[in-house]
Amino acid sequence: MSLPKYLLVRFLNAVIVLTVVLIITSMIFNKAAEAQLKSQIEEEIAIKFSTNRELAKSLAGNLTALRNWQENIRKAKYKQYGLDKPFIVRVLMRLRQQLAFDWGKAHYLHSSTGEKSVSEIISEALPRTTLLFVTGTILVILIGTPIGLRAAYLSRKLDNFITSWALLSNSLPVWWIGMLLIFLFSYMLGILPSGGFVSIPPPSKTFLRVVDVMYHLILP
């Protein structure tokens, strides 16, 4: 098999596997997503009723009319969000939303501009996350590889110590180690920031700003 054909087959296999995984994920989380959406619809109905004084006054004391009004609004919202469609259609709709990066609105989180779109929140945090992990990976390669080679070549005891330490450190929860490091270097010693991406106010010069960003990347 030629290299282009091999790459094409691998690519098609990856697309098929990814599609199947997305369909299964959509089916698993569809119920939870729809429950949240229905709760949101009920909140919208309650807000619409409470903020419309004339409507509340006209429906006051008439429980049947109030229920009919709520049911009509509910049916319209269900149709708007596709909740009145068959299960498989709703799953495919959820799959299309995932592929289009339409992940809905966040209830508690928001971007720096106040945007509650999940895709906007992720896109805002993604560059900083990428910078953090790429920088960490490069440092691990540049520092860890020479140390490992030298330890394996010169000293068996040092090699065993490094291997044991690596196994021990990888077995500990990362979030727990992070909390301990923040407590030690930020709150006790005060030499590293506990959070943030840049200082407030940030340095005006480009070089100092880069140094400031790297300074904030040390603990994460």
Image: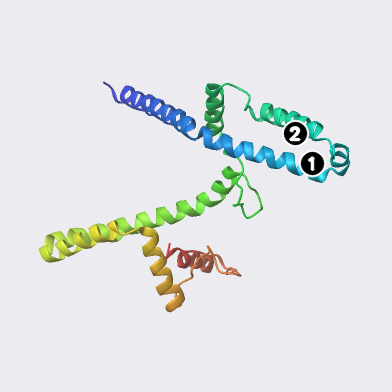
What residue is at 54 percent from the left and 47 percent from the top?
Answer: 122
Residue 88 position (above or below residue 52): above
Closer to the chain start, of discs 1 and 2, is 1
Q: CA distance from mark 1 to mark 2?
A: 9 Å
Q: Is residue 110 left or right of residue 13?
A: right
Q: Where does the image place residue 40, in percent across and percent down from the top left?
A: 65, 40
Q: Secondary structure at mark 1?
A: helix
Q: Is residue 112 visible?
A: yes
Q: Is residue 102 visible?
A: no
The residue to which callout 1 is attached is 49
Q: Is residue 137 left or right of residue 151?
A: right
What residue is at 40 percent from the left and 53 percent from the top?
Answer: 134
Which is more toward the observer, 47 or 100? 47
Determine whether label 1 and label 2 are within 8 Å by CB.
yes
Q: Where does the image place residue 155, in percent across and percent down from the top left?
A: 11, 65
Residue 197 position (above or below residue 36): below
Q: Secondary structure at mark 2?
A: helix
Residue type at numbered disc 1: Phe
Residue found farthest to the bottom: 189
Q: Where does the image place residue 139, in percent across and percent down from the top left?
A: 34, 59
Residue 120 position (above or below residue 199): above
Residue 165: image tag: none
The residue to which callout 2 is attached is 70
